[in-house]
Amino acid sequence: MTSVTRVYRFAASHRLHSPLLSDERNREVYGKCDNPYGHGHDYVLQVGVSGAVPETGVLCNVEALDGYVEDKLLRWVRDRNLNDWEEFGAVVPTTENLAMVALRRLSDGWRESFPAGPCLARVRILETERNSVECGL
């Protein structure tokens, strides 16, 4: 089994605030990220695929992967406030939730787009150089 990871970058903003919590509890849980004006990040998205390397020696057509990731995810998150995105209607747009949404969106239709392989293995999102979240299948 071999893995390939493709890296993408996008900028987006968000505010971490739950309407289910008091203002005081939101400040305790989310700290400075509960700023009412929000804040932004230059996110790094890593999409990992895995499978057996075929005779061609190429596990994944990266141009096809790039187009797929653009269509399924990047065009929806790039340069926007994540709080305004329908995916986060009832969920706080933490990086944990963003990674789970990214994995779910990329999984939906994967097999139809890549019928001969590879398999989608994981998604990792780096929010800062010190914070990253990874979700896998």
Image (cartoon, helix red, strand yellow):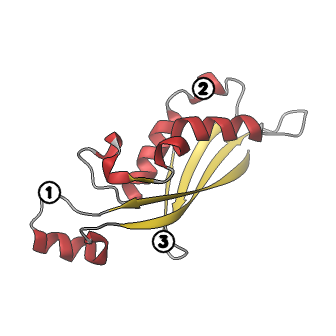
Q: Nearer the viewer, residue 112 or 116?
A: 112
Q: Secondary structure at mark 1?
A: loop
Is label 1 or label 3 in front?
Answer: 1
The quarter of the displayed image where residue 63 is located: top right
Instruction: Identify the residue position indicated by label 2 in the image.
Output: 111
Q: Position of residue 65 (x, y in %)?
A: 68, 38
Q: What amino acid does circle 1 point to?
A: Pro
Q: Earlier in the sequence, mark 2 or mark 1?
A: 1
Instruction: Look at the picture and state if 49 lies above or below 37.
Output: above
Q: Secondary structure at mark 3?
A: loop
Q: What amino acid does circle 2 point to?
A: Arg
Is label 2 or label 3 in front?
Answer: 3
Q: What amino acid does circle 3 point to?
A: Asn
Q: Secondary structure at mark 2?
A: helix
**What is the total number of numbered labels drawn onto the structure image?**
3
User: What's the mark number on residue 131?
Assistant: 3
Q: Residues within 10 Å of mark 3 (few under 14, many from 20)?
A: few
Instruction: Identify the residue position indicated by label 1 in the image.
Output: 19
Q: Position of residue 72 (x, y in %)?
A: 53, 36
For image coordinates 60% across by 40% down, the residue present is 70
Q: Is residue 64 left or right of residue 28?
A: right
Q: Is residue 14 left or right of residue 48?
A: left
Q: Is residue 99 left or right of residue 22?
A: right
For image coordinates 45% across by 39% down, the residue present is 104
